[in-house]
Image: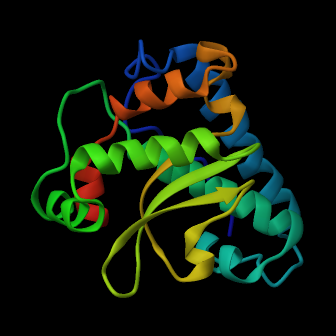
Amino acid sequence: MKIELPALPYEMNALAPNISAKTLEFHYGKHHQAYVTNLNNLIPGTKFENASLETMIMEAEGPIFNNAAQVWNHTFYFSGLQQANTSEPHKQIAAAIKSSFGSYAEFKDAFIKAATTLFGSGWVWLVKTAAGNLKIIQENNAGNPLRIGLKPILTCDVWEHAYYLDYQNRRPDYLNAFWNLIDWDVVEKRF
């Protein structure tokens, strides 16, 4: 099965000024595409040749896992963003955030702290546990919560390629900008 780069659900300049078109051109157009290309070059002749990304995430190791997870993670990240807005979580996700973290403000602070303090490159995830609780986890490199039995709800890419062109080494500034772009309707559906 050939893996395809999914289309963005918005124009390249739609996330500006929080994330510039130039950053999206590199992050989506070069990095995300490279993971797709690499994976398509790695899987022919393996047991993953016709497997889903989820199967590869759960069963593969090494380069196949890394590229499959990065394709999946990036697709999940980009599909959870929208043009800048001031909305906050609503409906069931709002209630779950309040139950798990005390308040939206406490959740936001905890998420940003986790993303700021993740050493090196990786992802910060809001996940749903088997018991139905929400928690924030850090995953290094291509780490994906599916692999450890958690349901992804929201993610932030904290690899430098996600923000360096716009924010250089100012990860906290990127995280505050990211917060302006979360599509809470998508997050609600994932919940």
Label total for image: 0
Residue lying at the far left in this picture: please name it: 91
> Residue placed at 43% from the left, 31% from the top?
178
> Looking at the picture, does residue 143 appear above or below residue 29?
below
Q: Position of residue 31 (x, y in %)?
A: 72, 37
Q: Is residue 177 above or below residue 60?
A: above
Snapshot colouring: rainbow
Can you say which quadrant of the picture contains the C terminus? Answer: bottom left
Res. 59 visible in picture: yes
Q: Pick whichever, 44 or 14, lies toward us.
A: 14
Indicate left or right for 120 with 177 as reference.
right
- At x 44%, y 48%, the residue is 111
Query: From where the camera sits, is residue 6 visible?
Result: no
* Above-or-below relation of 104 to 168: below
Quarter of the figure that contains the N terminus: bottom right
Q: Quadrant of residue 177?
A: top left
Relative horizontal placement of residue 99, taking residue 101 as reference (left or right): left
Quadrant of residue 188 within the rendered picture: bottom left
Which residue is at the front of the view, 87 or 137? Answer: 137
> Residue at point 82% right, 67% down?
64
Residue 45 occupies which quadrant of the picture? bottom right
Q: Position of residue 159 (x, y in %)?
A: 69, 39
Residue 176, how many percent across, how many down?
42, 27
**Residue 93 percent coordinates (x, y):** 21, 61
Residue located 77% across and 68% down the image: 65
